[in-house]
Amino acid sequence: MERSLVERARAGDADAFDQLVRGRIDAVYRVALAILGNSADARDATQETFVAAWRHLPGLRDLDRFDGWLHRITVNAAKMVLRHRRGVREIHLAPDSDFPAGSRPLAPASDLTASDFDRAFERLSVDQRAILVAHHLEGRGVAQVARSLDIPEGTVKSRLHSARAALQRALDELDR
Protein backbone atom coordinates (compact mmCIF):
# COMPACT_ATOMS: atom_id res chain seq x y z
CA MET A 1 0.00 0.00 0.00
CA GLU A 2 2.66 2.51 1.09
CA ARG A 3 4.95 1.71 -1.82
CA SER A 4 2.08 2.12 -4.27
CA LEU A 5 1.34 5.59 -2.83
CA VAL A 6 4.98 6.56 -3.36
CA GLU A 7 4.90 5.14 -6.90
CA ARG A 8 1.71 7.03 -7.74
CA ALA A 9 3.03 10.27 -6.21
CA ARG A 10 6.31 9.87 -8.08
CA ALA A 11 4.27 9.57 -11.29
CA GLY A 12 2.62 12.93 -10.51
CA ASP A 13 -0.52 11.86 -8.64
CA ALA A 14 -1.19 14.82 -6.31
CA ASP A 15 -3.79 12.90 -4.30
CA ALA A 16 -1.29 10.15 -3.51
CA PHE A 17 1.28 12.76 -2.48
CA ASP A 18 -1.35 14.44 -0.29
CA GLN A 19 -1.90 11.12 1.51
CA LEU A 20 1.85 10.76 2.03
CA VAL A 21 2.05 14.30 3.41
CA ARG A 22 -0.89 13.78 5.77
CA GLY A 23 0.75 10.67 7.18
CA ARG A 24 4.08 12.36 7.80
CA ILE A 25 3.46 16.05 8.45
CA ASP A 26 3.48 15.74 12.24
CA ALA A 27 6.75 13.78 12.29
CA VAL A 28 8.43 16.23 9.88
CA TYR A 29 7.26 19.17 11.98
CA ARG A 30 8.55 17.57 15.22
CA VAL A 31 12.00 17.02 13.69
CA ALA A 32 12.12 20.59 12.37
CA LEU A 33 10.93 21.98 15.70
CA ALA A 34 13.54 20.02 17.64
CA ILE A 35 16.29 21.28 15.35
CA LEU A 36 15.11 24.88 14.98
CA GLY A 37 13.52 25.53 18.33
CA ASN A 38 10.55 27.64 17.39
CA SER A 39 7.26 26.87 15.77
CA ALA A 40 7.37 29.57 13.07
CA ASP A 41 10.70 28.33 11.72
CA ALA A 42 9.56 24.71 12.07
CA ARG A 43 6.43 25.45 10.02
CA ASP A 44 8.59 27.10 7.34
CA ALA A 45 10.96 24.13 7.25
CA THR A 46 8.04 21.70 7.12
CA GLN A 47 6.54 23.55 4.17
CA GLU A 48 9.90 23.69 2.41
CA THR A 49 10.37 19.97 3.05
CA PHE A 50 7.19 19.00 1.25
CA VAL A 51 7.70 21.48 -1.59
CA ALA A 52 11.17 20.04 -2.17
CA ALA A 53 9.88 16.48 -1.83
CA TRP A 54 7.19 17.07 -4.48
CA ARG A 55 9.71 18.72 -6.78
CA HIS A 56 12.35 15.99 -6.42
CA LEU A 57 10.12 12.93 -6.02
CA PRO A 58 10.46 11.86 -9.67
CA GLY A 59 14.19 11.37 -9.01
CA LEU A 60 13.70 9.07 -6.01
CA ARG A 61 15.29 5.77 -7.03
CA ASP A 62 14.55 3.52 -4.05
CA LEU A 63 10.87 3.82 -3.22
CA ASP A 64 11.30 1.79 -0.04
CA ARG A 65 13.54 4.51 1.38
CA PHE A 66 10.99 7.30 1.05
CA ASP A 67 10.98 8.04 4.80
CA GLY A 68 14.77 8.29 5.02
CA TRP A 69 14.83 10.47 1.92
CA LEU A 70 12.17 12.73 3.44
CA HIS A 71 14.13 12.92 6.71
CA ARG A 72 17.23 14.13 4.84
CA ILE A 73 15.13 16.76 3.06
CA THR A 74 13.77 17.88 6.45
CA VAL A 75 17.26 18.30 7.91
CA ASN A 76 18.37 20.23 4.82
CA ALA A 77 15.28 22.46 5.02
CA ALA A 78 16.08 23.18 8.67
CA LYS A 79 19.65 24.07 7.70
CA MET A 80 18.33 26.42 5.05
CA VAL A 81 16.04 28.14 7.55
CA LEU A 82 18.98 28.57 9.95
CA ARG A 83 21.07 30.10 7.18
CA HIS A 84 18.37 32.63 6.42
CA ARG A 85 17.51 33.40 10.02
CA ARG A 86 19.11 36.46 11.56
CA GLY A 87 19.35 37.48 15.19
CA VAL A 88 19.16 35.41 18.33
CA ARG A 89 18.33 31.75 18.05
CA GLU A 90 16.49 29.80 20.72
CA ILE A 91 16.16 26.05 20.83
CA HIS A 92 13.42 24.62 23.03
CA LEU A 93 13.16 20.89 23.30
CA ALA A 94 9.75 19.31 23.48
CA PRO A 95 8.54 18.29 26.94
CA ASP A 96 9.78 14.98 28.31
CA SER A 97 6.45 13.35 27.51
CA ASP A 98 7.18 13.72 23.79
CA PHE A 99 10.27 11.51 24.07
CA PRO A 100 9.93 7.74 23.82
CA ALA A 101 10.30 6.12 27.26
CA GLY A 102 13.86 6.34 28.54
CA SER A 103 15.19 8.04 25.43
CA ARG A 104 15.83 11.64 26.53
CA PRO A 105 19.32 12.34 25.09
CA LEU A 106 20.95 13.32 28.37
CA ALA A 107 19.45 14.20 31.69
CA PRO A 108 20.71 17.57 32.88
CA ALA A 109 22.69 17.53 36.08
CA SER A 110 20.59 18.26 39.14
CA ASP A 111 21.63 21.92 39.28
CA LEU A 112 20.96 22.53 35.57
CA THR A 113 17.54 23.56 34.33
CA ALA A 114 15.67 22.63 31.18
CA SER A 115 16.55 26.09 29.90
CA ASP A 116 20.24 25.29 30.45
CA PHE A 117 19.75 22.08 28.50
CA ASP A 118 18.14 24.05 25.66
CA ARG A 119 21.08 26.48 25.60
CA ALA A 120 23.53 23.57 25.51
CA PHE A 121 21.56 21.90 22.71
CA GLU A 122 21.65 25.19 20.77
CA ARG A 123 25.46 25.02 20.74
CA LEU A 124 25.41 21.81 18.71
CA SER A 125 25.66 21.83 14.94
CA VAL A 126 22.52 21.13 12.94
CA ASP A 127 23.89 17.71 12.01
CA GLN A 128 24.51 16.88 15.67
CA ARG A 129 21.00 18.04 16.61
CA ALA A 130 19.50 16.06 13.72
CA ILE A 131 21.12 12.75 14.67
CA LEU A 132 20.17 13.17 18.33
CA VAL A 133 16.60 14.03 17.31
CA ALA A 134 16.34 11.05 14.96
CA HIS A 135 17.65 8.61 17.54
CA HIS A 136 16.29 10.00 20.81
CA LEU A 137 13.23 12.10 19.99
CA GLU A 138 11.90 9.95 17.17
CA GLY A 139 13.08 6.75 18.85
CA ARG A 140 14.78 5.37 15.74
CA GLY A 141 17.31 2.62 16.24
CA VAL A 142 20.85 2.84 14.90
CA ALA A 143 20.00 0.65 11.91
CA GLN A 144 16.96 2.75 11.07
CA VAL A 145 18.95 6.00 11.31
CA ALA A 146 21.66 4.46 9.12
CA ARG A 147 19.10 3.54 6.45
CA SER A 148 17.45 6.95 6.59
CA LEU A 149 20.76 8.79 6.22
CA ASP A 150 22.18 6.18 3.82
CA ILE A 151 25.33 5.75 5.92
CA PRO A 152 26.86 2.73 7.67
CA GLU A 153 25.66 1.85 11.18
CA GLY A 154 29.16 2.39 12.53
CA THR A 155 29.06 5.96 11.25
CA VAL A 156 25.73 6.53 13.02
CA LYS A 157 27.21 5.20 16.26
CA SER A 158 30.24 7.44 15.86
CA ARG A 159 28.14 10.52 15.12
CA LEU A 160 25.81 9.79 18.03
CA HIS A 161 28.81 9.42 20.32
CA SER A 162 30.29 12.70 19.08
CA ALA A 163 26.96 14.55 19.38
CA ARG A 164 26.39 13.26 22.91
CA ALA A 165 29.94 14.21 23.89
CA ALA A 166 29.47 17.70 22.43
CA LEU A 167 26.21 18.08 24.32
CA GLN A 168 27.84 16.89 27.54
CA ARG A 169 30.70 19.40 27.06
CA ALA A 170 28.18 22.19 26.52
CA LEU A 171 26.27 21.13 29.66
CA ASP A 172 29.52 20.98 31.64
CA GLU A 173 30.41 24.51 30.51
CA LEU A 174 27.03 25.76 31.71
CA ASP A 175 27.45 23.97 35.04
CA ARG A 176 30.67 25.82 35.89
Image: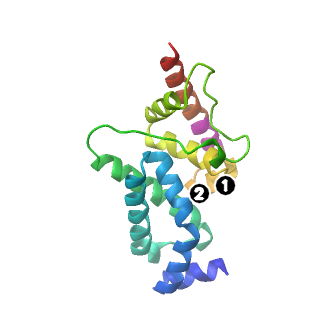
- Please provide percent x and percent y for residue 10: 49, 80
In depth, the one of 95 and 176 nearer the eye is: 95
Which residue sits at x=34%, y=47%? 82
| Residue 111, image quadrant | top right
Q: Are marks 2 and 1 in contact (CB under 8 Å)?
A: yes
Which residue sits at x=50%, y=72%? 60
Magenta span: helix, strand or loop, mainly?
helix
- The residue tagged 1 is 144
Range of residues picked out in magenta: 154-160
From where the camera sits, is residue 69 visible? no
Cα separation, mark 2 vs mark 1, equals 6 Å
Pick out the residue farthest to the right: 101
What kind of residue is marked 2? Ser
SS class, disc 1: helix
Q: How many marks?
A: 2
From where the camera sits, is residue 145 visible? yes
Which residue sits at x=49%, y=24%? 170
In depth, the one of 158 and 116 nearer the eye is: 116
- The residue tagged 2 is 148
Q: Is residue 29 above or below residue 52?
A: above
What kind of residue is marked 1? Gln
Q: Is residue 130 left or right of residue 44?
A: right
Colouring of the image: rainbow
Q: Is residue 145 left or right of residue 83?
A: right
- Name the disc covering residue 93, or none: none
- Please provide percent x and percent y for residue 7: 56, 82
| Residue 147, image quadrant | bottom right
Please rate how many residues cluster around mark 2, counting C-alpha atoms within 10 Å: few if below 14, some from 14 to 19, many from 20: some
